[in-house]
Amino acid sequence: MASLNHPANLKYSKTDEWVRIEGDEAVIGITDYAQDQLGDIVYIELPWESGQTLAGEEKFGDLESVKATSELVAPLSGSIVGANQELKDHPEYINDYPYEKGWMVRIKLTDASQLDDLLDADSYLKYLQGR
């Protein structure tokens, strides 16, 4: 786990999603730890069209890897303003670049106070060590 990357500028959920805040929007993906545990990701199902509303802790998609299928859980509430269309043809970006090209959805936040429930990088690493 020591070689995995968990940037300090992001927030993390206990379901292994990361959040990067950009103004009143949040970019969401899965952590380096999560992609490492899943193995090679071969398919992703996301809400590809903008406008869908997500509630915090609600399922918003699925990842299929060579090992398993895993649910994606929204760490925050908001309205989807965009999905990473490149992942349709290149789901491997999630493995190779989980924090850059591997982002999944961008949402307009409806309740910024939910950020307080997420973990910073140090707390997330401590959480992972306790698993």
Image: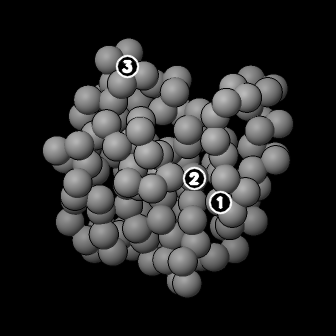
Find disc 3 in the rendering and name its residue: 68
Query: On the rendered structure, is 21 left or right of 117?
Result: left
Q: In which quarter of the image is the C terminus?
A: top right
Task: Looking at this view, name the residue that lies furthest to the top.
Answer: 67
**Circle nearer the N terminus (2, 3):** 2
* Mark positioned earlier in the residue sequence (2 or 1): 1
> Relative to 129, is 115 on the left or the right?
left
* Mark 3 residue type: Ala
Q: Label 3, secondary structure: give it.
A: loop
Q: Could you say where residue 117 lies in the image, as x and y percent from the top left?
A: 73, 59
Q: Which amino acid does label 2 sit on?
A: Trp
Q: Is mark 1 on a helix, strand or loop?
A: loop
At horizontal 28% and vertical 74% (from top left) the residue drawn is: 51
Question: Which residue lies at the image location 26% right of the left edge and 29% below the top edge?
Answer: 42
Q: Establish if 26 lies above or below 48.
A: below
Q: For the residues labelled 2 and 1, say whether their Cβ atoms are less than 8 Å apart.
A: yes
Please give the label number shown on residue 18.
2
Quarter of the image containing the N terminus?
Answer: top right
For label 1, the residue is 10
Q: How crowded is mark 1: few (under 14 residues within 10 Å), some or many (20 or more)?
A: some
Camera-side residue: 96 or 89? 96
C-alpha gap between disc 2 and disc 1: 6 Å
Query: Horizontally, is 80 left or right of 38 in the view?
Result: left
Q: Can residue 29 be seen in the rendering of this structure?
A: yes
* One can see residue 71 in this view: no
| Residue extending furthest toward the left | 89
Q: Which structural element holds mark 2?
A: strand
Residue 74 placed where, x, y %?
Answer: 49, 54
45 w.r.t. 38: above or below: below
* Residue located 39% across and 49% down the image: 102
Name the image colouring.
Answer: one colour
